[in-house]
Amino acid sequence: MVVNATLDAAVFLLLLGAAVVGLTTADAGPQPTLDDGRSDAVANVLATSTATVNYSLSPGARRANESGADFRRTSGPEFERTTHGSLAGLLARVTVGTAGFDGTPVTHARDDFRSSVREAITARLVPTGLRIDAVWRPYPDAPVEGHVAVGASPPQSAATDAATLTIPTRTQSLPANETDDFEPLSNAVAAQTIETVAPASRTRLALRGDPPVSTLVRYRYARLAEALNVSVEDPIADADTDIANQRLADALAPRVESDLRARYDSPADAAAAVSVSEVRIVVRTWGDESEGGR
């Protein structure tokens, strides 16, 4: 089963990651069991059940200070936030927020937020015999990706039932005129990748605002620039996120092109494999092996 759900309206700071300190979940009926449709029932709960999440930016700010950020304060009312969304939407947000290059996260500001989203899901769903994997990556085996897992992996011998939800990231699909050749295709994928992890319009507003938001965004851009070996210090000082994002995309594009040329026979095949505009959530369920044959 494939369930398409609209990504909840996101506060940009959730993409940066944040520490969730409390939550409440809306009642969406009885918890599904393995007899209720298994993975389909779980996917439906993820898509339709909601949670209100209270979180703090303080843990992320403290961790950023250890790596050179300049937070004069790392606690106080200005660090506290609340958001609301479906379980699938929250999971998609934190998956994008965990994105990193070659296994290294852009920031650690999302660590506690990720843990609390997991808690929100396991509070609503019985975790026994359940594994949920949310993945965002621009294309298979891309150098940048986000992955959040909930639950233990199924035993190798277990017969699993699976369902998939696809959550849009608000990044536009590839324009048709940019899929005819590897170079423009790679440029488009790189640009959309950077736009997903650092949305230019929202980061611009954040940079023009007050700490701690502005400091977190500057730190995020510094980490992206370090990962891609490019400087964005001047445009970020002017809150010109369009130029900053273009520099980051230009630095990423050659690696994307090299990957796509090596893995696909044609630009059309490569374009068909691009998934930068979505988070895929795969639900797997299985029964108790000790009950087999009953």
Image: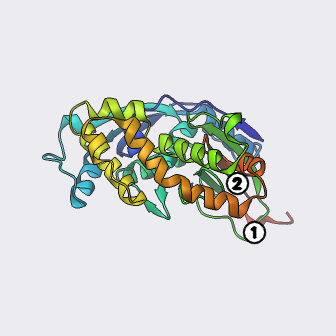
On residue 290, the disc is 1
Left or right of 22 in this view: 260 = right
Q: Position of residue 196 (x, y in %)?
A: 50, 41
Q: Amino acid at mark 2?
A: Arg
The x, y position of residue 11, in whole percent, is 40, 32
Q: Residue at x 54, y 52 (%)?
A: 253
- Give the residue drawn at x 46%, y 44%: 197
The residue depicted at 56 percent of the width and 59 percent of the height is 255
Local crowd size for mark 1, using a 10 Å CA cut-off: few (<14), some (14–19), many (≥20): few
In this rendering, the answer to whether 110 lies above or below 166 is: below
The percent coordinates of residue 279 (x first, y second) are: 60, 44
Query: Element under label 2?
Result: strand
Q: What residue lies at 21% left-to-right and 55% top-to-bottom?
A: 65
Left or right of 266? Residue 126 is left
Q: Quadrant of residue 24?
A: top left
Of 230 and 141, nearer the camera is 230
Q: Nearer the viewer, mark 1 or mark 2?
A: 2
